[in-house]
Image (cartoon, coloured by chain):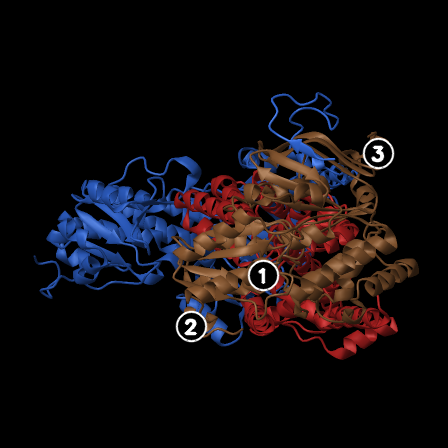
Amino acid sequence: MVSDGERRPETTGEVICGREGEAADTAVIEKGGKWPFLLGVLMIAAYILGACGFRGSASGDNKEEYGREAGRRNGEVSSELSYTGSMELRFATGFFVDYYEGGYRLIGTEEGRRYLVIPKGARAPEDLAEDIAELKQPLTNVYLVATAAMDMVCELDGLDLIGFSGQRAEGWSVEEARRGMEEGRILYAGRYDSPDYELIVSRGCSLAVENNMITHCPEVREKLESFGIPVLVDSSSYESHPLGRVEWIKLYGVLLGREEEAREAFDRQAEALGRVAGQEASGKTVAFFYITANGMVSVRASSDYIPAIIRLAGGKYVFEDLGKEGGRSTVTMQLEEFYHQAKEADFLVYNSAIDGEMESLEELIQREELLRDFKAVRQGNVWCTDRDLYQRSMSAGQLLEDIYNMLSEERDRQEETVYLHRLRNGEGQDGEP
Amino acid sequence: MVMREYFFRVKGLRAGYGGKAVVEDLEVLLGRGEILSLIGPNGAGKSTVLRSIAGQLGLMGGAVFLDGEVVAKMKGPRRARRMAAVFTKGPRTEMMTCRDVVAMGRYPYTGRFGALSAGDVRVVDEVMELVHVRDLGGADFNRVSDGQRQRVMLARAMCQEPEIVILDEPVTFLDAGYKLEFLSVLQELRRQKGLTVIMSLHELELAKRISDKVLCLRGEYGWSFGTPEEIFVPGAMEEVFGICPGGFHEGGGGMELRRPEGQGDLFVIAGGGTGQSFFRRLQREGRPFVTGIIYDNDLDFPAAGALACEAVTARAFEPVEGRVMDRAKWLMDRCGRVVCSQRAIGSLDLANRELLEYAKGAGKLAAMEEVTGSAGTK
Amino acid sequence: MESRRRRGRGGGALAFLGAGCLLLLACSVFWGSVLIPFGEFGKFLRGEGMDEAYRKIVVDIRLPRAAAAFWLGGALALSGYLLQTFFHNPIAGPFVLGISSGAKLAVALVMVEVLGRSMTISSGVLIGAAFGGALVSMGVVLLMSRRVDSMALLVISGVMVGYICSAVTDFVVTFADEAEIVNLHNWSRGSFSGMAWGHVRVMAGVLSMAVAAVFFLAKPIGAYELGEEYARSVGVHVEGLRVLLVVLSSVLSACVAAFAGPVSFVGIAVPQMVKRFIGTGSPLWMIPASFLGGSMFCMGCDLIARTVFAPAELGISTVTAVFGAPVVLWVMAGRRLGWS
């Protein structure tokens, strides 16, 4: 028997296999119900992880609430302590200090954390509120990561309370700090994101002073706190008033028990403001910047403390309303934008913190050809900061005077600058075109 | 012809890829223990049909029945216990011995984690013995020869204890020896286990010999199904494969290359099977020729028909008709030379004897070596 | 295929790997940047208790870190094994489907949008975000796998997803502070520093479920070794298996990316080493062996990373690359020579 299949217009109608176009995947062989089970596992796992995240996360709202009022209410601290007053802060907004009977001090920071400084010999109150960390004086073996704090600690002569540093010896431009590390009195304890916990725990540590970078590695903070080491975040760099930064020395004064010295140090810097404040504003425009590795220009946000200093010194910062969103302190912009805005600036100040100091205009122009066209370059009014300026947190007042002097355009005044120096131009003579 | 009588049935199958069908309304009926070969030109859809039957590809229409059950409705493991497959190329494996590969066939029977029980091990041993790969057990699968590898894959399929095995061009890449060996193993399995086999083959000669049934796919939805005698009728393969007439002889001659162009100047007296190789040599040299008288049962008959520009033929076991003789002589007159491939013409072959004398008389007889370009061997 | 010899070799190998893990665990406990005298351990064993600081170091610093390296190293190797099987390709790694790029993007977003606005979060948020980002990458690749039949195309989709995530990350980072850029860069180098028992608990929970699921898939994975066609012919639901392999390997790698950041080479090198060590590719052996092999490798590398230059730490990926890259090269050379 032979069957011959030719193309037929209709099939015989009994399509047993099933629906027309029961598509290519009907070769399907049924599988057990593993899918839903596993998807469920995934959901649960993701949920668990997310839930861990929100356990005890301090939200940004605390910032508003923390205010001086909040700390003051006795019930929120301890029934044993009686409030006697608060520290007067002229410019700083990032922290507060409340005084209590018996020498106790309550420190509160911008993120909503609180610390009770317990004077030597005294004991901690029994019913101290849960969230308040105890700091018994004298503090020992402090782990100092916030570079801004070192200058202040040295100013207060408190270096012997520091046990660990987040930088190697060579990384410090603060002389005493470097020497302390070289002589082994202060140990390098690893970078901020991977500290040597073993070292820290083995020697004991009463406090870790970190900067804002720690917020990006919350597990480090959690780990330190799990060992009973309180973590204090120095957010002085977020202060918008330059003297606000400097005023943080008062906080360190409280921590180290040198409140009087702190006050005096602050006042000295504040005097500079006094000297300068009354003068006429020169109205000269200033740009503060540096060139990044990939050719962009990094400038300060208008609300940052450097522009504030410039304004206080009587100058005018070229960028208005820059970086309003997000509370950033620096803004990276394209070269043409910078060119457009700063070409006619009277003064250019180059920030040497990242790539090092420059001495001559030639170096600057080599960096970026376009700068040749700038008015300040043509007139020889280009200055550069000293490298270690950024570690000199106490320097705000001096920097204020320096900028004031720079803007004054008086030769002798300009030579008195401490943290700024003018870039030589090719002819070897300072500033002569 | 009731469905129940047949072990394996394809009804109204429409198969294809991505919405495009390559075959439509296919009907196949197989009894238990029969071997079905799928032949046809490339692109006609052999692989598609095989894969559809084997459940690798979804059906676009129609149904496949195994012993009354719809194959598409069988769950994977159940189907695997009844139907197994061997594909053209063996898989690339890492660190697997031949025995490991064969043991994979026990998948539908092993437990949760695939560990082999004593019973499984026994089956593997038996199968390997049956398929003659027992000695290869410990060898690395990648290191064995192609022929051995395909047999190992067959053994693997047999471990599924299937009632039917589907093979997609299983011997295409094997040499002649391995081809035969593989097919004999299949026959043995059929004999010993009552195995039903469906396979696609390029080798028409082998298909003719091994198949109980043949399915020929012609392309353009055309197909024929039947016994080898019904499918391999004269002219059928030429039509299916687009070979020029005479190029394929179903009767047993096989394939011949193209006839030389032009008028033949050479007359060849052949017969008894002696002429074939000479015809082919002439074909290689591109020399057209005429030949006669060839009896229709002679071994030279297919080659003569395919290669000579004219072949004078006669019925076997009957006296040669006069007009046939005349035709032969007339052709001989028009040729310049005559050769004879037979050493000695048989005493009963009166017609060819007469032709030989006629050639001698005309002074045209020459030796084969003189006539051909290359030094020939007799 | 359980011939007695095979079982012997496999069992021996597993025992060796297990012992290796225990040994490395002990080393991780004894060694660190602070030298703890053996006498202290003796005291502990005698029941007298250790010095408090030492106890804290061992129990709260070294042990959780070693445990994390154990779990995450195993997860990486197992994920690498699954993907190498899935793609029939020996250099597929746990992040080939763009998992780490998705995690990095999520972390970048959190750092720039949340932390950049001076809000504080706990470590769990970063971990959860990284895990979520990784799973989103996986989801996109799964969607692509439905439309794409060839394995090569699937790898390409994974790689493209990775590139897209990287591009978006770069975009996000353009508007970020230097602080975020530095932190993101540090995150993406991968590290086991700062692991706490809370982390270990969560990862152990998730990973043990994933590993158990993989174990249940050992049989179909074995069938898959012969190729998809043969697997299907033997009754395996290949489409479903594909999805499960992608999902499970992604969960394994996502866990690693979430807790420790992208750690390279473990997933590529270890399954190859282990396969040659146990002498068979059978999944029943490879699954536990890969896991233990990865754990050993990771624990060893982390130990080196944190002790050699203490108190500074070497990046974990640096150490794994130093030991892992030669292995990958050797495997490639071996394959070329061994194949016709």
Which residue corresponds to the image point at 17% horizontal and 44% vertical from the top-left?
A: A343
Q: Which chain is blue?
A: A
Residue nearest the viewer, comparing B304 with C290: B304
Q: Evaluate whether residue B323 shows in this view.
A: yes
Q: Which residue is mark 2?
A: B370
Chain to which mark 1 belongs: B
Report the amino acid beneath label 1: Gly
Q: Which residue is mark 3?
A: B68
Q: Which chain is red?
A: C
Q: Which image quadrant: the N terminus of chain C?
A: bottom right
Q: Nearer the viewer, mark 3 or mark 2?
A: 2
In this view, C76 is above or below B226: below
Residue nearest the viewer, comparing A293 with C317: C317
In this view, C140 is above or below B286: above
Say few, some or many: other residues with alpha carbon within 10 Å of mark 1 (under 14 / 14 to 19 / 20 or more).
Answer: many
Chain to which mark 2 belongs: B
Q: Secondary structure at mark 1?
A: loop
Q: Residue A193, image x and y in percent? A: 55, 58
Q: Residue B228, image x and y in percent? A: 70, 45
Report the amino acid beneath label 2: Glu
Could you tell whether C235 is left or right of B285 in the image? right
Which circle marks residue A189 in the picture?
none
Q: Which residue is mark 1?
A: B271
Say few, some or many: other residues with alpha carbon within 10 Å of mark 3 (under 14 / 14 to 19 / 20 or more).
Answer: some
Q: Earlier in the sequence, mark 3 or mark 2?
A: 3
